Amino acid sequence: MLGTVLDIDGGFKREKRHSPIPQAACNLIWELKPTQMMRRKNNNKHYFTRMSTRKKVHAFVRVRPTDDFAHEVIRYGDDNKSIDIHLKKDTRRGVVNNQQTDWSFKLDGVLHDASQDLVYETVAKDVISQALDGYNGTIMCYGQTGAGKTYTMTGATENYKHRGILPRALQQVFRMIEERPTHAITVRVSYLEIYNESLFDLLSTLPYVGPSVTPMTIVENPQGVFIKGLSVHLTSQEEDAFSLLFEGETNRIIASHTMNKNSSRSHCIFTIYVEAHSRTLSDEKYITSKINLVDLAGSERLGKSGSEGRVLKEATYINKSLSFLEQAIIALGDQKRDHIPFRQCKLTHALKDSLGGNCNMVLVTNIYGDAAQLEETLSSLRFASRMKLVTTEPAINEKYDAERMVKNLEKELVLLKQELAIHDSLANRSLVNYDPMDEIQIAEINSQVRRYLEGTLDEIDIINLRQIQEVFNQFRVVLSQQEQEVECALRRKYTFIDKNDFAAISAVQKAGLMDVDGHLVGEPDGQGFGLGVAPFSAKPGKKAKSKKTFKDQLSSSARKEGASSPVGGKDLDVSISKTQLTPSSKDGDVKDMLLRDRETSNIEPPSSDSPKEELRPPRPSTPPSKPVAFEDFKNERGSEINRIFKENKSILNERRKRASETTQRINAIKREIDMTKEALNFQKSLREKQGEYENQGLMIIDEEEFLLILKLKDLKKQYRTEYQDLRDLRAEIQYCQHLVDQCRHRLLTEFDIWYNESFFIPEDMQVALKPGSSIRPGMIPVSRIMSLGEDDQDKFSQLQQTMLPEGPDSISFYNAKVKTEQKVGLEQRVSTLSRPSLEPEHRGPVSCVLLCAQRQFLRSRWQMHMGSLPYTNI
Ligand code: ADP
Ligand code: MG
């Protein structure tokens, strides 16, 4: 469509000689590219929402006054917002001549013969004014050398009337400050020059600046871009600001002479930093802004030939940086582009947040009005057109004064506390303190928490949020103290060994101090061949007599005091002494202890399956102590269970011993593996040092290394086999332990029943207890009562049939089933028992039959389970 199109990638096609479009239609509309026009049509909604916050860059053209203005070539639009360029056709080009001869550039204003005053009013005044409200602003002069950039930006420093944007901006800032007595506004300035990609501080010569230690660098942070090392000067009045400007200008000129550099080949950025705090103390917000006034280097393209040495270097840098600026601007103008190449050169990097960022941006393109400069003029106008496509998103830079914020929050806090006090008094709450707690209050909460945990305090009253938080906190404190206490107690009694310390572990094993259960072998890591050392088993074995667990220590000390022990994690029960043994639901604990004491005794009970109730001697006037009675029980009615129990125990111990031996073997293999690996590595490194031999792609190794490889392979195999054995053994041990526990429990339950029957049931009830009688009231444990009324023998045999094929898991299944059934019949049975006059036909079968049946059932079940295991010596 267009005779000349923009090349997005930076450059542009200057002419399109074979355009099929008639010349008359070739007037250029530079404002929008066709693609952009389409996109905006299609995305109207998106466009307008963005437009609400976004703003276009303003682009003005200033024409340098000349006596030889090319009236025929350069024409301004009636609204003074466009420039048309018309070239006469070059007749020498022949009949077919598609040479482009017309261009039209839409702008925000053309400044022809404009005074410095008018230029400032048109270009800069609003930007500066908005800077005082917190908006960043950037004004940039672009154009070929001599076109009037410096004149526009700085002006003639010797003539006040001809002063440029810069001094006028400073004046406006200070004037506006005077007009805003409600704000304390500070002004700072800096002056940066970028020459051949190096940064220079044009104000570094000031006496108080001091030498720059490191070269200046451009730094980015969330607040924006700043130049590290560039001096920034506080100016309290207009005059100081001018002095700084002149100082910078002077340095610019001196540098041009001494360093032989051409000032038109450098970019200069004068920055005014404004910070405005409200004088109202309560206002914690403040605003900051930055005004960048940029005088760019000459934009003319230097002839490719003829430039050499310094000029060539300058030309390269200047062309590069302006071309990068152009690329950044093209990218900014393209709404599809996410990435803007700001970091390609110092100029674009330093201006990153000023180009298309959150600032008000104005471009002044300085051009010559002479026909001779037409090519560069066209180039400058194209740049201006591109700049007009860029949009920015001006936003106020609002910040918060931390100090003021704290003060305000403190005030608010006081108010809220007062509010709370009113609320409390209205709600009839006694004065609640909302201040942070002091040490005494915290100590009180700590004490409350302790009492609560001990059970001496039922509730902790809620007072306020702070108190609730402190209560939780103290729970944590108490918990960690208790942990420490337990650990200290353990450490006082035991020596802890690092489970990874093989040397210490084997030393302890040799010294016979370690439990045979101290599993010293690692779990395989599941990937290839993993070796390691596993934690010790938590269960102490028989040999661990000298190394009792903490729990055992507690048990034995409790026993010495004649009290029940907290075996099985139950609470310490000190209410039952050895001499006061009475039928109690907690007696199990005592018996458990008694049993544990006797587990290792060598007294062989007489082997008999028949119940001994009938042979029992006359009842003594005082019941024997439980330990004595227990011995009797084991020899009489409990003899069979005791025998099974002991057999299971011995199997368990035997398996534990084997596991320990296997563990030691595995550790020995592991050590040997390590040593072999080491030797192999040594051989390998030796081979590598001596040079490797290869034969048809195969590595040649010596016999020693080969043997080591074989040995390692063999050892690994052994390790795996042994480890598998150990795993099997552990499974057996676990299962065996379960059986032993079951036996122990049964033995104690039987003992309990036997003890009660033998010594506590009143004489007149003895008849009912005889075999063939119906019930055992009163002293019979509830679990037994609940089974009355069933055809137990049938039930057991039924269970036996249905359960046993399921394996060891059926034990818990059985227990659960029985419990459920017991629950269902509980109430009915209890009411039955509470009526002694119950008719005989309503009574269940005698409990001794039940006991016998149970016993037989259990025995056969245990034996069958054991039979399914590799060991069958029961
Ligand atoms: P640039 O900075 O673009 O290289 P300068 O601003 O140094 O160009 O201008 C070159 C010369 O032209 C200076 O002597 C300057 O005074 C003069 N000049 C430029 N523009 C104007 C103008 N609008 N009115 C009067 N003199 C101008
Ligand atoms: Mg200049």
Image (cartoon, rainbow, N blue to C red):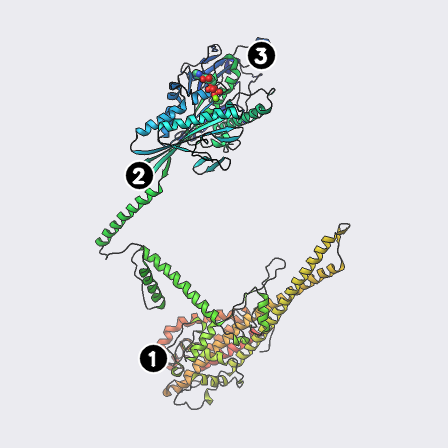
Count neighbours of disc 2 (C-alpha within 10 A) and say few if under 14, some if 14 to 19, many if 20 or more: some
From the top left corner, tell me how far across and down residue 728 is, in percent. 60, 68
| Mark 2 and mark 1: Cα distance apart in space | 88 Å
The residue to which callout 2 is attached is 283
Q: Is mark 3 within 8 Å of ligand 1?
A: no
Q: Amino acid at mark 3?
A: Asn
| Quadrant in the picture for residue 834 | bottom left
Asked if residue 456 can be seen in this view, the reply is yes
| Image mark for residue 811 | none
Above or below: residue 148 compared with residue 722: above
From the top left corner, tell me how far across and down residue 604 is, in percent. 54, 85
| Image mark for residue 97 | 3
* Tag 3 and tag 2, C-beta contact below 8 Å: no
- The foreground one among 145 and 581 is 145
| Quadrant in the picture for residue 46 | top left
Q: Is residue 179 left or right of residue 499?
A: left
| Image mark for residue 835 | 1
Q: Nearer the viewer, mark 1 or mark 3?
A: 3
Q: Residue at x 27, y 56 (%)?
A: 433
* Tag 1 and tag 3, C-beta contact below 8 Å: no
Q: Residue at x 35, y 37 (%)?
A: 286
| Quadrant in the picture for residue 519 | bottom right
Q: Is residue 723 left or right of residue 449?
A: right
